[in-house]
Amino acid sequence: MAKFLRPLVGIGASMLLMASAAGVAAASESSTASVYTCGFQAAPWCALTLANVNQRAQPTSKSAYIATVPKGDAFELWCWAEGEPINGDNIWYYGSPNVSPPFRPEGWVTGYWLDTGHDPAAQIKHC
């Protein structure tokens, strides 16, 4: 399933459903979905999580668990790579939760549950 077809659960996110002449519904993601500047030199870009997301040691759900990034929290996007597809989205982002030290674990989060608008986000470099 394409990323833009999943139910959006982020704050202020919405789906626009339009019925075509043939009676088929099409979905369009809200224009609010985007990567934004979070102000850090090491990771100048952030995205909000759309659900509680498990951060992993590698870009796969089977790798070691690091931490859970709560729904609605900012995640710093340092770079992206292809990994295990999650609901059809195989882009994973390496970075860290945008929280105060001391607990700022580094690891991978699937792009499927990040409000990036499109994966991979154009602003983010490949790892």
Image: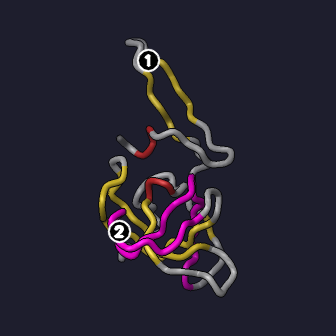
Residue at the spot of label 1 = 20
Q: Secondary structure at mark 1?
A: loop
Task: State whether residue 74 is above or below residue 34.
Answer: below
From which residue to which does the magenta span run? 42-69
- Number of numbered tags placed on the structure image: 2
Q: Quadrant of the N terminus?
A: top left
Residue ranking furthest to the bottom: 102
Left of 98 or right of it: where is 62?
left
Mark 2 lies on a secondary structure that is loop
Q: Is residue 109 above or below residue 116?
A: below
Front residue of 21/98: it is 98
Mark 1: give few (<14), some (14-19) or many (20+) Cα within 10 Å.
few
Label 2 sits on what residue type? Answer: Pro
What number is the disc on residue 96? none
Residue found at x 61% / y 62%: 70
- Depth order, front residue of 95/71: 71
